[in-house]
Image (spheres, rainbow, N blue to C red):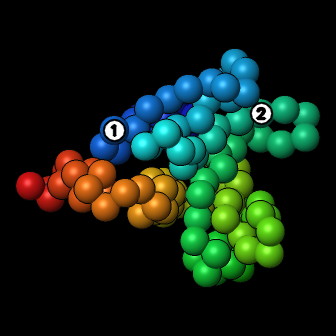
């Protein structure tokens, strides 16, 4: 997937927004005011990549399955994964991860907001 593909999919999720709080070419995608995905342009140290919020048990499984994926730690649990966009995993699985990241944030929102967002998902009406 390209960064443009990632951005298009992320912004297609209900009430997702894009901001650049960390500077140009470092967009973050939010729902309910919280980040669920961050894009980073290629540098000398790494290729284009996306960092996604992730449930710790799924993060462990994905890191074992795809060696190019790197975990981010927060405390003692994994909450974020960094995925290079250069064929680190199939595009379909990456879109599933983007949806999962969105869902991780939505699951922490107040019940009425969570229910409203779930009702806005395509195919849920």
Mark 2: secondary structure:
loop
- Above or below, 56 against 32 in this view is below
Asked which quadrant contains residue 40, the reply is top right
**Can residue 91 be seen in the rendering of this structure?**
no
The one of 67 and 104 positioned closer to us in this rendering: 104
What count of labels does the image hold?
A: 2
Asked which quadrant contains residue 72, the reply is bottom right
Mark 1: secondary structure:
loop
- Above or below, 44 against 83 in this view is above
Residue found at the very far left of the displayed protein: 125
**Residue positioned 68% across, 60% down in the render:** 81
Across and down, in percent, residue 1 comes to 53, 44
Residue 15 - label:
1
> Circle 2: is it few (<14), some (14-19), or many (20+) Cα within 10 Å?
few
Across and down, in percent, residue 118 comes to 25, 57
User: In the rendered view of the protein, which quadrant contains the C terminus?
Assistant: bottom left
> Circle 1: is it few (<14), some (14-19), or many (20+) Cα within 10 Å?
some
Drawn side of residue 54 relative to residue 22, left or right: left
Residue under numbered circle 2: 42
Drawn side of residue 110 relative to residue 21, left or right: left
**Residue positioned 48% across, 56% down in the render:** 105
Q: CA distance from mark 2 to mark 1?
A: 28 Å
**Can residue 102 be seen in the rendering of this structure?**
yes
């Amino acid at each position: 997937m390209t960064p443009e593909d990632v951005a298009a999919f992320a912004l297609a999720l209900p009430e997702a927004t894009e901001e650049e709080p960390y500077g140009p070419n470092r967009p973050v995608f939010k729902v309910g005011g919280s980040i669920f995905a961050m894009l980073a342009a290629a540098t000398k140290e790494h290729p284009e990549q996306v960092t996604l919020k992730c449930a710790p048990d799924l993060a462990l499984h994905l890191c074992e399955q795809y060696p190019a994926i790197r975990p981010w730690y927060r405390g003692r649990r994994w909450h974020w994964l960094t995925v290079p966009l250069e064929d680190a995993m199939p595009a379909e699985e990456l879109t599933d991860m983007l949806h999962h990241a969105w869902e991780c944030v939505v699951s922490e929102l107040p019940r009425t907001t969570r229910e409203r967002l779930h009702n806005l998902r395509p195919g849920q009406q």
